[in-house]
Amino acid sequence: MNHVTWRVHDDVAELVLVNPPQNRIGERAAEELLAAVEAIEAGPARAVLLRAEGSDFSFGGDITSWPDLGHRQLRVLFEKFLVAFNRLERLPLPVIAAVQGLCFGGGFELALRADVLFAAETARFGHPEQSIGVITLLGGAHRVAARAGWARAFEWTLTSEQVSAATMAQAGVVNRVVLDDELLATARSFAAKVAGGPTRAYEANKAVLRAWVDGGVSAADNALFDIAMPLFHTDDARRGISSAIDALRAGKPRPVLDFTGN
């Protein structure tokens, strides 16, 4: 039985954790995640929706094998997780996560790889790692810090408290909080809308933001034109610019285009 599945429907790839009730993420899930991400990138999808089956998104990593592994074996295992998670984060497509219930540990770190994070009203987030004497092993703390600041990120690693979706939204970690029974429909609608947009421009925006994360404003400025200029040769940009000019000259509103992603 798979722990991760995926399918593409109407240009949106749905990437799903399918090991409820806890959706624990072990070595098998990491391998299936990596294979799915590689297939999605090579395929026709123009947006990705990350979600989970069951009442909870994920309780985190499957720690049951850890006591039996040596230092080197543990490092190899965690590097395998990190590679899979980071491949999702670096997909040249918008990634939207829909989180319900408990989103803890490695599950939280996986959700943080999304570009846009929707959460159900009753969703709760947290880092339980300090309760077992370790740290966020897949980059959770510093990714929260990038969104919410050092102070909140460090506090949450100290306490392992279950933080509400509303608090996470106020801190800038979560984009939107929606009613529990509307979560999936809302996230799917947003993903479908994004999938109909200028895919190459979304990829470029993501690359510029990645340059900023890696090196700040100066690094993003230095990379900006190398990333942006090829867009002017895309079909979407050519049609978009031409239609905007035509509308301007005619004194009409700019038309809403059906972008092809090319």
Image (spheres, rainbow, N blue to C red):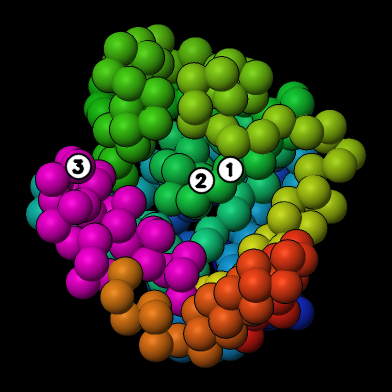
Looking at the rendered structure, which numbered label has been put on residue 194? none
Looking at the rendered structure, which numbered label has been put on residue 217? 3
Question: In this rendering, which labeled residue sits more in front, label 2 or label 1?
Answer: 1
Q: Residues within 10 Å of mark 1 (few under 14, many from 20)?
A: many
Q: Label 2 is placed on what type of residue? A: Ala
Q: Is residue 112 above or below residue 144?
A: below
Q: Does the segment drawn in magenta span residue 97?
A: no
Q: Label 3 is placed on what type of residue? A: Val
Question: In this rendering, which labeled residue sits more in front, label 1 or label 3?
Answer: 3
Viewer-nearest residue: 65 or 110: 110
Magenta part mainly helix, strand or loop?
A: helix
Tell me the SS state at disc 1: strand
Q: Are the residues tagged 2 and 1 within 8 Å (C-beta)? A: yes
Viewer-nearest residue: 206 or 11: 206
Give the residue at x 13% y 45%.
Answer: 218
Question: In this rendering, which labeled residue sits more in front, label 2 or label 3?
Answer: 3
Give the residue at x 30% y 12%.
Answer: 151
Give the residue at x 39% y 80%.
Answer: 232
What residue is shown with label 2?
Answer: 111
The reply, left or right, for residue 82 in relation to residue 245 is left
Residue 177 percent location from the top left of the image: 71, 31
Viewer-nearest residue: 246 or 107: 246
The reply, left or right, for residue 172 in relation to residue 15 is left
What residue is shown with label 1?
Answer: 117
| Image quadrant in which the N terminus is located | bottom right
For the record, the magenta segment spans 200-227
Give the residue at x 64% y 24%.
Answer: 165
Residue 221 percent location from the top left of the image: 19, 52
User: Mark 1 or 3 closer to N-term?
Assistant: 1
Q: Does the segment drawn in magenta span residue 213?
A: yes
